[in-house]
């Protein structure tokens, strides 16, 4: 397995997950995160993203390591970056430091297949039909023509990232080990919403 740092700077952000081989644009304006991005960019361009909880500055135990693939400073002091996902990690413990931002000791072993994906046979036709209904009813737009050009893992990861679901449901998805498990979990979540709001069983043309 490729070497990644055991201690990484982490940007905790509620409601945001992202996955390996996906991109996350970020608009950075808080002092502590400006420092984090500058330090990461000048070192190895690596930083972690993890969902924050609502109490006591707690974070969830699984996040994603990303590499800063684009970096631009604006005239008003903000930093605009693109973060490209590499591999997920487990949070082991927070490390004390004298910096404004937080750093954590992390472990990547559980998610080794993020770097060496297994070939999995997955039937997604029903899921994608349901997702189209779900997105249509919630007013979420997606360029389906461009979406179809993605490989299967990118499709499932993209849908997991952008779906209008709860933070806890997003976390369930990022914690799924295999793509098959993630696909089934996403379908169960979508089924719940379709059933709960009594969506009409039709498809978007």
Image (tube, rainbow, N blue to C red):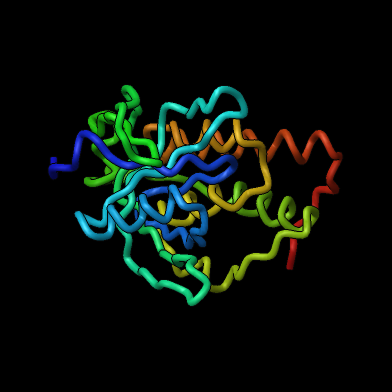
User: Which residue reaches farthest front?
Assistant: 98
Write the residue at 18% across / 42% down: 4
Write the residue at 13% across / 42% down: 3
Residue situated in front as seen by the camera: 133 or 101: 101
User: Which residue reaches farthest bottom?
Assistant: 75
Residue 39, x across and y down, in percent? 28, 53
State the quadrant of the C terminus. Answer: bottom right
- Please say if 123 is above or below 158: above
Residue 35, x across and y down, in percent? 37, 52
- Please say if 144 is above or below 33: below
Total numbered labels: 0
Residue situated in front as seen by the camera: 98 or 53: 98
Residue 125, x across and y down, in percent? 57, 52
State the quadrant of the N terminus. Answer: top left
Residue 2, x across and y down, in percent? 13, 44
Residue situated in front as seen by the camera: 148 or 16: 16
Write the residue at 43% across / 50% down: 33
Write the residue at 48% across / 62% down: 25
Residue situated in front as seen by the camera: 121 or 17: 17
Q: Left or right of 92: which side holds 77?
A: right
Q: Left or right of 142: which side holds 116?
A: left
């Amino acid at each position: 397995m490729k070497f990644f740092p055991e201690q990484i700077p982490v940007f905790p952000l509620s409601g945001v997950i992202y996955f390996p081989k996906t991109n996350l644009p970020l608009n950075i304006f808080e002092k502590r995160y400006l420092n984090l991005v500058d330090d990461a960019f000048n070192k190895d361009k690596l930083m972690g993203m993890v969902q924050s909880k609502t109490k006591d500055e707690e974070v969830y135990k699984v996040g994603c390591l990303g590499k800063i693939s684009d970096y631009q400073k604006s005239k008003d002091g903000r930093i605009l970056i693109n973060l490209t996902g590499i591999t997920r990690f487990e949070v082991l413990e927070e490390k004390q430091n004298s910096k404004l931002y937080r750093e954590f000791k992390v472990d990547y072993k559980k998610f080794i297949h993020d770097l060496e994906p297994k070939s999995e046979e997955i039937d997604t036709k029903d899921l994608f039909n349901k997702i189209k209904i779900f997105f249509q009813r919630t007013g979420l737009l997606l360029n389906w023509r461009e979406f179809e050009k993605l490989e299967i893992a990118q499709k499932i990861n993209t849908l997991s990232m952008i779906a209008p679901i709860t933070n806890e449901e997003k976390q369930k998805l990022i914690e799924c080990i295999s793509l098959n498990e993630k696909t089934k979990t996403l379908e169960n979540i979508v089924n719940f919403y379709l059933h709960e709001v009594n969506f009409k069983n039709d498809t978007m043309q």
